[in-house]
Amino acid sequence: MSIRDMIEGRKEWKAHMARVKALPQDYQIVYKELQKYLFKVGPVDMGEGTELLSGIVDLFEEGASLGKGVLEVTGKDVAAFCDELIKDSKTYADLYQEAVDQKTAKAMNKATDKLK
């Protein structure tokens, strides 16, 4: 990644966050929680820049412009809302589960080999 790409990415992120800060307070709170959740368990490849997060901001801006509360947009289970957004994506949780399964299978094979 070139310095120019890093500078451009930073500009895009600042513009994105300016959009978030322009949202009503309840939307900002839920956005920040969604962001944390997605960064922890979200898709391994969130795409270039902030595509998924920008889509959420688009949805939030539309909801706010219609006078809806944020939970009318996401539903009361915000984690389920996130899960639905990333249901067809490979997540960090999937990678962790695969690693645990592989380690378990390897350990079980070693234990079986010792019993023979």
Image (spheres, rainbow, N blue to C red):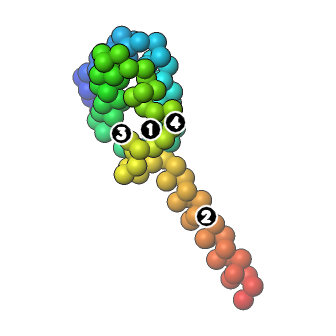
| Image quadrant where residue 74 sits | top left
Q: Give yes or no for contact between labels 1 and 2 (Cβ–Cβ under 8 Å).
A: no
Q: Give yes or no for contact between labels 1 and 4 (Cβ–Cβ under 8 Å).
A: yes
Q: Give yes or no for contact between labels 4 and 3 (Cβ–Cβ under 8 Å).
A: no
N-terminal label among 4 and 3: 3
Question: What residue type is disc 2 on?
Answer: Lys
N-terminal label among 1 and 3: 3
Q: Viewer-nearest of labels 1 and 2?
A: 1
Image: 30 above or below 80: above
- Rendering coords of residue 71 (x, y %): 46, 26
Q: Helix or strand or loop: what does disc 3 sit on?
A: loop
N-terminal label among 2 and 4: 4
Residue carrying label 1: 81
Q: Viewer-nearest of labels 2 and 4?
A: 4
Question: What residue type is disc 1 on?
Answer: Phe
N-terminal label among 1 and 2: 1
Residue located at (36% from left, 51% from top): 88
- In the image, is 42 to the left or to the right of 58? right
Tell me the distance, in whole angstroms, between the alpha carbons under discs 2 and 3: 27 Å
- Rendering coords of residue 54 (x, y %): 31, 27
Residue carrying label 3: 46
